[in-house]
Image (spheres, rainbow, N blue to C red):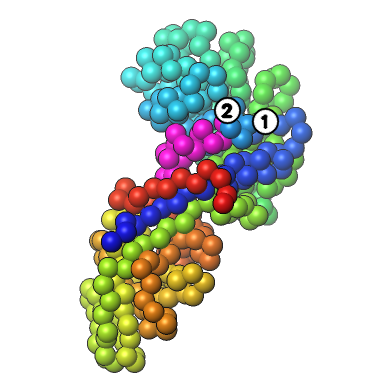
């Protein structure tokens, strides 16, 4: 039996980065966000593909993730740590030349005392209330910090995936108030912010989900496909039930394929009775509950039972699957299981 196979199209990721770089506009640098193992797709492989496409600046969440990316890329590219300089990370930040985005007075003190002269950026809170210096803190330390020469000053938008949300303009205005005239490179936009238009782009954009084919970058190339093996089929009589809690009942004679992946492989249990799998271009409904390692699929209408069924691919994106599960593509991608065989496609055939 074939393994469940997750195929990651590195060429599509490179094309998406170039497209987002063009959208970012002339004179604006485009970074690549590869936190959480590049949204579950493999930080080393993805970072190398982005570097080949032209990316020179990368963002991760944690210093450990930065270490993995440095190992993949070697010296040169700038690797930024969004969670900043955390206790215990000083040696790694120094030895691997990582650039923390300092987000509190405590982190600023830690960094300037432990690694004077080492690169850093500053993260400002323009209204998301999650990370970064607030206005009064920034006003207090800005004169000293600007003197120390941060590589950039950045902030993050809370509602950029909703273009008409009033929060976007409010944060933009606050970012201007906090940073106009400081003479340092500035960054505000992730994927959603790039879509909002050039006034949000400043000097550096930081796309993540758009690289991996997710909304709101609607013209993205498809990046992932996930093909699951059929391990058994069952003929079910009308009135018989399938799976835990008898959550699905056959109305007529049915052929049910049992497929080897479940919620332990990142297929949310909320997909029970709600998702489609695909035999090439033919949709086949997932029936009954998603169990830990298995799902059951109605293939009654297929001329013959295929060896595999696709749950991600040309006819179903991570966003489509997320909609069916009641979540977002970020969560679908970062949940992709460790049991899949991973295939990296370098070039289109
Ligand atoms: C995750 C993240 C990004 C990338 O966001 P996407 O919506 O995936 O493009 C950029 N900046 C910060 C601070 C982030 O946390």
Asked if disc 1 is less than 8 Å from ligand 1, the answer is no
- At horizontal 50% and vertical 46% (from top left) the residue drawn is 345
The residue that label 1 is drawn on is 29
Residue nearer the viewer, 141 or 206: 206
Q: Tell me, yes or no, whether the highlighted magenta stretch contains residue 198.
A: no
Which type of secondary structure does the marked residue at label 2 adopt? strand
Q: Residue at x 71, y 31 (%)?
A: 28
Q: Quadrant of residue 246?
A: bottom left
Left or right, residue 203 beside residue 55: right
Residue at left 35%, top 50%? 341
Segment colored magenta: 34-51
Viewer can see residue 20: no
Foreground of the two, 224 or 186: 224
Q: Does residue 187 sit above or below 255 in this rendering?
A: above
Q: Quadrant of the N terminus?
A: bottom left
Q: Position of residue 220 (x, y in %)?
A: 62, 52
- Tell me residue 174's x, y (percent): 66, 35
Taking the image as drawn, is residue 201 in sight? yes
- The residue positioned 49% from the left and 69% from the top of the image is 280
Q: Secondary structure at mark 1?
A: strand
Picture mark count: 2
Compared with residue 119, is residue 185 higher up or lower down, i.e. above or below?
below
Residue under pointer 2: 57
N-terminal of the two: label 1 or label 2?
1
The residue at the far right in this view is 26
């Amino acid at each position: 039996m074939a393994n469940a196979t997750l195929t990651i199209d590195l060429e599509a990721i490179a094309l998406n980065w170039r497209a987002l770089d063009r959208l970012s506009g002339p004179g604006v640098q485009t970074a690549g966000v590869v936190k959480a193992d590049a949204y579950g797709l493999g930080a080393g492989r993805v970072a190398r593909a982005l570097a080949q496409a032209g990316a020179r600046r990368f963002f991760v969440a944690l210093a450990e993730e930065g270490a993995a990316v440095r190992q993949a890329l070697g010296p040169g590219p700038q690797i930024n740590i969004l969670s900043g300089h955390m206790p215990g990370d000083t040696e790694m930040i120094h030895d691997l030349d990582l650039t923390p985005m300092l987000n509190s007075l405590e982190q600023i003190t830690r960094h300037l005392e432990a690694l004077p002269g080492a690169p850093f950026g500053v993260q400002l809170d323009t209204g998301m209330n999650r990370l970064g210096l607030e206005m009064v803190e920034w006003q207090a330390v800005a004169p000293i910090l600007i003197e120390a020469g941060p590589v950039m000053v950045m902030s993050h938008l809370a509602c950029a995936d909703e273009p008409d949300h009033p929060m976007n303009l409010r944060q933009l205005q606050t970012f201007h108030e906090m940073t106009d005239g400081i003479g340092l490179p500035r960054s505000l936009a992730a994927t959603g912010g790039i879509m909002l238009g050039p006034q949000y782009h400043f000097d550096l954009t930081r796309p993540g989900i758009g690289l991996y084919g997710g909304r709101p970058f609607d013209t993205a190339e498809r990046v992932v496909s996930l093909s699951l093996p059929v391990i058994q089929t069952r003929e079910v009589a009308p009135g018989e039930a399938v799976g835990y809690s008898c959550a699905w009942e056959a109305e007529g004679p049915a052929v049910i394929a049992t497929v080897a992946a479940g919620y332990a492989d990142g297929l949310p249990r909320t997909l029970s009775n709600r998702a489609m799998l695909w035999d090439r271009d033919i949709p086949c409904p997932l029936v009954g509950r998603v169990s830990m390692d298995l799902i059951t699929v109605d293939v009654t209408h297929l001329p013959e039972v295929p060896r595999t069924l696709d749950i991600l691919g040309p006819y179903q994106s991570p966003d489509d699957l997320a909609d069916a599960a009641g979540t977002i593509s970020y969560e679908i991608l970062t949940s992709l299981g460790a049991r899949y065989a991973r295939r990296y496609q370098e070039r289109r055939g």
